[in-house]
Structure formats: C-alpha cells, structure tokens
Amino acid sequence: MKKILLTFFALSLVLSSCEFDKGFEELNVNPAKASQIDVANKFASVILQTSGGRYENWRASLIYQSVMIQHFSSTAGYWSGDRYFRNDGYATSLWDRYYPSAVKEIEDIKAQLTSEGNSGSEMGMARILRVFIYSRLTDLHGDIPYSEAGQGYTNGILKPKYDAQQDIYMDMLKELEAAVAQLGSSTTMGAGDIMFQGDMAKWKAWGNSMMLRLAMRLTKADSATAKAWAEKAVAAGTMTSNDHIAMVQHTDGPEGINKNGHGEVFDADGNPRISKTFVDWMKDDPRLPILAARRSDGSTAIADLIGMPNGSTGVTVPDTSIYAEPNRGVITGRDAPMVFQTYAEVRLLKAEMAFRGWSVPGDAKTHYEAGVKAAMQMLSQLYKNAAAISDAQVADYLAAKPYDAAKGWEMISEQYWAATLLNEYESFSNWRRTGYPTLIPTNDPGNVTGGTIPRRLIYPTGEESTNADNFAAAIARQGPNDFKTRVWWDK
C-alpha cells in the first residue's frame, strides 16, 4: 500500500496546479500537454486530493468548521472560526485547493473516459466521486461553478458560471442514480481504487448512501423532493455495515498528500482542545476516552476530561493544559483514515426518515440504536489504537439513555453530530439543516456575524475580478458574500 501511494503522490504533483494558483484563467491550461496518463493512476491521485492536504484541512475543516460546530475549541487568535472572525484566506481554502486539484482532475478523468468510450464501472466510480467533491463545495459556499467548472483545457471555459445550488442538487442526485447504474461487477482501476479496492458492491452502497445524504439535506428547502430521493436511495441499497465506510486509508509518508491532512495539522498545532459542549454531552459515553485525552499528562480517565468553552482567549483561559485535546495516541495520526461517509450516518438518516413517517424498513428506534452502535464500534475499526467498545457497553449506554420518540429528531441529530467528529464538513452541514444540537454562540467583540454562528464560508475575493460577471450574478441570486448568507437548502 505504501509503495502504491508513493507512486500516486508523485503523480499528484504532476496533475495538480501550484499551491498558490488561484483564479480560473489558470485552471487546466496546459499548452504542452504530455501523453495521456492511465485513468487508474489519475483516480488514486484525485481521491487523495479530495481527502485533502494540511492547508485546507487546517483552515476550512478545523480552524473554521470544527469550532463553529463546537467539536473543538481554541484560544489561539488565528483560530478564526471560534469567535467568528473573517479571514479570507482561511475561509476560502477549500475552494482554493479543490478547484485546481480535485475538480480539475475529476473533470479530466471524466473527459478521458468519455473519449475512450468507457461507460462502465470506471465512469460510474468517477461520477460518484465527482458528486462528492462538488457536494462539499456547494454545501460550504452555496452557488458555485459546477456545470462549466474544470473545463479550461478540455472546452476552453476560463470563466465558468456559478450554478444555482438548487440546480446543482437536482443534477447531483440524478448523477448518482445514473452512476450507480453504470457500476458492473468489476473494474479495471486496480490499485488506483484506494478507497474500496475494486469492490463494486461497496461503490454501489456508497453511491446510494450519498444519494440518501443529499436527499436529506433538502428537508428544509423541498421536503417532497427529499422524501422521494431518500426513499429511492434506501430501496436501491445503502451501506449495511461498518465494512462499507467510505474512507481514505492514509500512510505516514512520504511528504504531502499521502498523509492525513488532519494528522499533519495536529502535528504542527497544539492549540485545539475538545469543546466543553462536546465533552459535557459525551459524559458517560464510552467513546469519550477514545476520542479525548487530557493535554497535561495524556490521561483518558473520565474525571480528568474537561472541555474548554468555545470563545475562550488567552486572557480568560491562561492555562489550557488542564483541558482535553483530541487523543493523540489514537485519532490524530498522519496515517489515520480520512472518512467521507459512515454506516452510522446512514442508519441515523434512516432513523430520521422513520421519525418523519417516510417509507423505510424498520422503525426510528431500531435505526437509532443501530446507528449509535455503529458509531461506537467503528472507532476500533478506523483507529488501530482505539479500544473496542463491546456490545454490552453499547447496550448499557442505550439503556441509560433510551430513545425517546417525543425528542426523536433531536436525539438522532445529536448522535449524528457526535458520529461526525473529524468529518467537519458533514457535521457543519447537518447542523445547519437540523438545528441540533442546540449550540450557544460566542460573541467576541471582533466577530463579523453579530454573535451568530456562521451559515456558510465565503467566496474568494479574487473571483470578483477574475470572474466578475458570474460572481456578480451569484451574489445577486444568493445574497452578500458573507458568513450570514444562507445557502439555498438552509433557507
């Protein structure tokens, strides 16, 4: 595996734009194009680019989303999201990285497969991954370049239009349905499939599970469409166990994208602590000593695990060593997996479907309990040093905190929030959709939201000059380019 990733790391340097490349004029423009590289090699590269490097995982994932959603907390001033400061470079980091890398590469792969007449498993896999890439971008920013994105070289589109998020979502759902239908019983991707190692059953399950996720994202904006697509996804067959988790298994080397981007952040930055909101909610939960450890001595004893309040500063909290941090012996490794979607999430979404009275086999309580169990027991599967949580421990937890139908959606959503620690893109999106858990905002004097938790991250300001007409159209349709403007599905 390490040898394979070494090869793909080298490829990623060839395929990706310069780290500081910004603006669409530069995307895909390659007048001295080399001979075509095999799609299997490109596919491994784009998976790694989608998982992301230290840059965007530090800024968009951790510095902003993880503290806004109150998984983590930090007193460091540059952790802008904890107190709702505006740092344009940090808040646009996913956009700045994805468009020159993951977007460019997946569009190139799709174009190459089309030119080669490949309409089978390889095209289906590429289309599923493509939807995942764009779903992250649109969920975080709203209206984005989609239908014309990444086509600077292939179609000469240097100033792509911003598609309306509603249109993007309708197309992504159709894309997933068509993509799953293209998957056969095998693939020629070989070692290039570093997610599921050529297992088409797992690709089908992920495609349908992502369809369920995107369908449920629409519950506020278009409940009827959400219901129709969610039921279609479930009928088609979603994940059935923790063996179906969609993730990238990283390695501790060489330099760059083969390493887990979060792991690289934790190596470089000792500031993040576990939020008081998260620790207080997790008391008596067997996951807590796996996920958290006291900074001063590494203790994982429940009594030693204290969460740090969000909005803390070096003045209000001069000594942060007493607070719990992400458990560095378990979940912060550079060789840890980067998770895209889990079976636990799927079962909890099905629990919400049942809660709403939609057509899904099983009742809300059954799916809720299965989701909690999967979330607890996946930790020892994901992290080699994680203690296994037994069936008896799960049963004890559920007996102490039984599912209450009167508070069903709240309980389901809170468990989803807990299960998506370190999948901050998904956690932030689902919190905006559901409103759970109930979070108390910070209100730093320097905040730019009026003391409310941001609803999106902003567009790069450079877009206003490099893609002016399309940028202006997006602003006119969606609203001001600030943290308070809600994306379509959040209105």
Image (tube, helix red, strand yellow):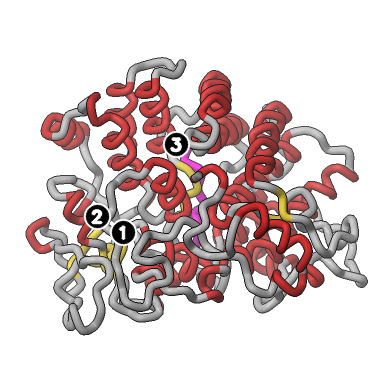
Among numbered discs 3 and 2, the one appearing first in the sequence: 3
Query: Pointer 3: what residue?
Result: 243
Among numbered discs 1 and 2, the one appearing first in the sequence: 1
x and y, in percent, of residue 202 in the image: 55, 34
Residue type beneath disc 2 = Phe
Bounds of the magenta span?
Answer: 242-251
Residue type beneath disc 1 = Gln
Query: Pointer 1: what residue?
Result: 70
| Left or right for 57, reference 363 | right
Q: Are marks 1 and 3 in contact (CB under 8 Å)?
A: no
Query: Pointer 2: what residue?
Result: 278
| Left or right for 76, reference 179 | left
Location of residue 397 (image quadrant): top left
Instruction: Give the label on residue 343, or none.
Output: none
Q: Are marks 1 and 2 in contact (CB under 8 Å)?
A: yes
Q: Secondary structure at mark 2?
A: helix
Residue type beneath disc 3 = Asp
